Image (cartoon, rainbow, N blue to C red):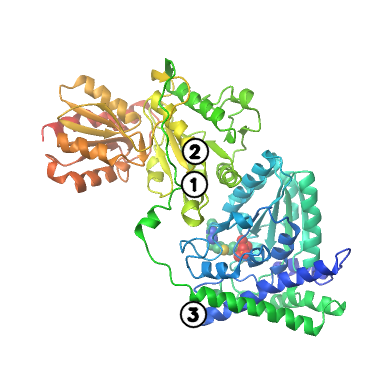
């Protein structure tokens, strides 16, 4: 017998043996109706699929007891984060079927305006946060919602589902670990159906059961017969109550089986027949129906009438969804839904002026934001007692307390997911990357979850990710990168990159006012080397407005961050008349400022510390060519750093940086 069969045979009897304990007939019947509905919808969907009316279907047939039992065990206002086989969560939360079907058909009355498919949506009205395709990403978000509930002193559980395959992802480890360290009231439900697509458990993990994992994280575990709806419901109801009273994460393994292919086209050829038959005899719907019948709680007539009523509802709602007109493409509408609307209201600086270092201006901005927004939570590695590796958050723990200033485990992905969850729970948050380079560990959460969530289903990610960036400090390839262009390419993110302390403070304050995800770059070589006038108190600076640093007539230098300082240094040396534009924000980009200047000077140099190829300089150069061609007296030039990783040794780093060739390139362009 194969390992998978042996493993799946162990939980045996409990899958079929129902013990109704103290459950009322009413509850037993509710469980019955709730488990029957997703099964019948699926059967209908499969026939739709065969007729070519829908494109894809991920079947949960055989696993319904988990979705239904879990959802019934929770209160209606407790969040649940499903995966791709959890139709029963949506139906048990009474999501209107017409809307659900419209969602599957990409219609307007669905949940995503045709922008995302199947179960890839959330509905705060139903306290459901649906998945993105990337399997592990849900888990960090659940941590964030659970944290929001805990901080709000609400006694609530947040439940998140993962498959056994998805649990191999780093997100699983990071999120369970974070939930454990922070004692978050989150119920982590692993639907162990023995396969991840075609890969059996024996090739997915080495341990026997997910219950063995709890000890490693220092948390409790529970194993349930996932095809036994009474067991799932009763045990999870008791567990939910216990978590409400004593907030903590618990890992629940539900043993079950997927009776159909991963998605319909893929089939189940790789599943041994014996195994399929074994689980077929443990069908959660049929067995429960038989049990109720045997107990005398359900008659043949009631079975018929219940099925009839559900069938009628499905047919009626499906017809309505089909009757809805196909969605119309509207350019403006799509573009206007990428970001949550934010009407900026300017607060000009009025406070006294003092000279501040770049790092102190950022700290000042953070303090102002913390005072302004009581719901703002700071998260990052070593940011509490230690004050962060660059000491930006020094003293904030004492000022704002440990709930708002949180040291995180070394878990970038989980914490960025947590930030989105906090936003869903009504909080603002900041995530400090210890170095901008480490954002690669949380890249997926930023570019796929935070960036796309508003466009997909209207939820915003009210998150500021602080990115200590840049080279010039001889820190080598992994502590010196300029990675802003990774993010300027992703619709849904705003990208801020100040060059001066006054701007750093005002733009950071705006970043916290803005309800959208903001990548905020701060050059660490400027932290302690640059000092200038900064206003005290609260003020903000609008995004998308460049700063004109110097007026000139010979050539425009379009730049940002450290590039601004290089250009200003050159300006001191040269006799030429340079017009230096500090972009301040890359998304949104102040195109007008660029175009107006280039039209005046007739020559443009785009300068950045980032490596040349694929940097934002290429984009800006293209925009200038497209919009200012007739006023140009020379080709637009780009000055970026060498297309190599950032080297360590001082002499190599100096050669690498764009600054080393700036003067020559500017002279060439002036003489063109
Ligand atoms: C990060 C990521 N890698 C790969 C995939 C493709 N994929 C979708 S579902 C799946 C199998 C998931 O298995 P499991 O988590 O056990 O859930 P199940 O489908 O068995 O319910 C795979 C590999 C994906 N969606 N996301």
Other residues around mark 3 within 10 Å, as few (<14) / some (14–19) / many (≥20): few
Q: Is 378 left or right of 360, judged from the image as shown?
A: right
Determine the CA span between mark 1 and mark 3.
Answer: 35 Å
With respect to residue 11, does 512 lie above or below?
Answer: above
Answer whether labels 2 and 1 touch (C-beta < 8 Å): yes
In this rendering, the answer to whether 4 lies above or below 156 is: below
Q: Secondary structure at mark 1?
A: helix
> Ligand 1: does it lie within 8 Å of the C-beta at label 3?
no
Q: Nearer the viewer, residue 405 or 41?
A: 41
Image mark for residue 446 = 1
In the rendered view, does 551 fall on the left or right side of 643?
left
Residue found at x 76% / y 72%: 32
Q: Tell which tag, 1 or 3, sits nearer the viewer.
A: 3
Q: Quadrant of the N terminus?
A: bottom right
Q: Quadrant of residue 16?
A: bottom right
The residue under label 2 is 465
**Where residue 520 sits: x, y (%)?**
44, 36
Work out whether residue 303 can be spotted. Answer: yes
Provide the secondary structure element on which disc 2 rests. strand
Tell me what residue is drawn at x 26 percent, y 22 percent. 569
Quadrant observed for ligand 1 in the rendered image: bottom right
Name the foreground residue: 232 vs 2.
232
User: Residue at 38% across / 44% down in the picture?
Assistant: 488
Q: Secondary structure at mark 3?
A: loop
Q: Position of residue 383 (x, y in %)?
A: 58, 29
Badge 1 density bin: few <14, some 14–19, many ≥20, Cα 10 Å: many
| Percent coordinates x, y for residue 608 in the rendering | 31, 35
Label 1 beta carbon within 8 A of ligand 1: no
Alpha carbon distance from label 2 to label 3:
44 Å
- If you read the primary sequence from the N terminus, does the residue marked by circle 1 or circle 3 appear first? 3
Q: Which residue is mark 3?
A: 52
Q: Neighbour class for label 2 at 10 Å: few (<14), some, many (≥20)? A: many
């Amino acid at each position: 017998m194969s390992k998978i069969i042996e493993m799946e045979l162990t939980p045996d009897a409990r899958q079929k043996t129902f013990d109704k304990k103290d459950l009322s007939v009413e509850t037993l019947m509710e469980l019955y109706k709730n488990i029957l509905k997703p099964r019948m919808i699926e059967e209908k969907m499969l026939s739709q699929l065969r007729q070519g009316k829908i494109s894809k279907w991920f079947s949960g047939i055989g696993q319904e007891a988990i979705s239904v039992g879990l959802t019934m065990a929770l209160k209606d206002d407790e969040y649940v984060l499903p995966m791709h086989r959890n139709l029963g969560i949506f139906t048990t939360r009474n999501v209107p079927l017409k809307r659900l079907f419209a969602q599957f058909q990409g219609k307007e009355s669905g949940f995503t305006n045709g922008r995302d498919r199947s179960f890839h949506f959330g509905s705060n009205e139903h306290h459901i946060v649906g998945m993105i395709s990337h399997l592990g990403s849900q888990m960090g978000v659940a941590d964030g919602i659970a944290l929001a509930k805990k901080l709000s002193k609400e006694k609530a559980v947040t439940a998140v589902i993962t498959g056994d395959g998805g649990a191999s992802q780093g997100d699983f480890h990071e999120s369970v670990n974070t939930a454990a360290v922070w004692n978050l009231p989150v119920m982590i439900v692993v639907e162990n159906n023995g396969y991840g697509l075609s890969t059996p458990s024996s090739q997915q993990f080495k341990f026997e059961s997910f219950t063995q994992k709890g000890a490693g994280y220092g948390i409790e575990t529970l194993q349930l017969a996932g095809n036994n709806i009474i067991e799932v419901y009763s045990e999870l109801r008791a567990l939910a109550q216990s978590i409400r009273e004593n907030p903590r994460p618990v890992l629940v393994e539900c043993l079950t089986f997927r009776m159909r292919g991963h998605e319909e086209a893929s089939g189940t050829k790789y599943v041994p027949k014996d195994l399929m038959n074994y689980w077929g005899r443990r069908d959660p719907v049929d067995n429960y129906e038989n049990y109720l019948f045997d107990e005398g709680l359900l008659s043949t007539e009631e079975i018929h009438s219940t099925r009839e009523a559900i069938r009628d509802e499905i047919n009626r709602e499906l017809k309505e969804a089909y009757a809805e007109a196909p969605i119309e493409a509207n350019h403006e509408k799509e573009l206007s839904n990428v970001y949550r609307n934010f009407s900026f209201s300017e607060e000009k600086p009025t406070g006294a002026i003092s000279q501040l270092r770049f790092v102190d201006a950022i700290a000042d901005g953070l303090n102002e934001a913390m005072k302004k927004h009581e719901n703002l939570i700071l998260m990052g590695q070593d940011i509490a007692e230690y004050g962060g590796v660059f000491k930006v958050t020094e003293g904030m723990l004492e000022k704002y307390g440990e709930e708002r200033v949180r040291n995180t485990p070394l878990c970038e992905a989980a914490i960025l997911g947590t930030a989105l969850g906090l936003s869903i729970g009504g909080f603002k948050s900041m995530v400090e990357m210890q170095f901008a380079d480490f954002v690669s560990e949380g890249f997926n959460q930023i570019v796929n979850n935070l960036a796309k969530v508003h466009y997909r289903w209207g939820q915003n990610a009210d998150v500021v990710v602080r990115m200590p960036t840049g080279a010039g400090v001889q820190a080598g390839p992994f502590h010196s990168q300029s990675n802003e262009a990774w993010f300027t390419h992703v619709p849904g993110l705003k990208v801020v990159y100040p060059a001066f302390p006054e701007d750093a403070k005002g733009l950071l304050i705006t970043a916290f006012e803005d309800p959208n995800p903001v990548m905020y770059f701060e050059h660490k070589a400027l932290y302690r080397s640059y000092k200038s006038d900064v206003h005290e108190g609260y003020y903000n600076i609008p995004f998308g407005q460049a700063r004109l640093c110097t007026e000139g007539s010979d050539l425009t230098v379009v730049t940002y961050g450290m590039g601004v300082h290089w250009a200003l240094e050159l300006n001191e040396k040269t006799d030429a008349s340079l017009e230096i534009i500090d972009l301040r924000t890359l998304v949104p980009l102040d195109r007008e400022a660029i175009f107006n200047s280039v039209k005046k000077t007739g020559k443009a140099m785009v300068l950045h510390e980032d490596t040349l190829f694929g940097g934002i300089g290429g984009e800006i150069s293209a925009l200038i060519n497209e919009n200012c061609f007739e006023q140009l007296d020379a080709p637009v030039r780009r000055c970026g750093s060498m297309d190599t990783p950032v080297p360590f040794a001082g002499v190599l780093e100096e050669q690498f940086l764009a600054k080393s060739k700036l003067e020559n390139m500017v002279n060439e362009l002036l003489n063109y």
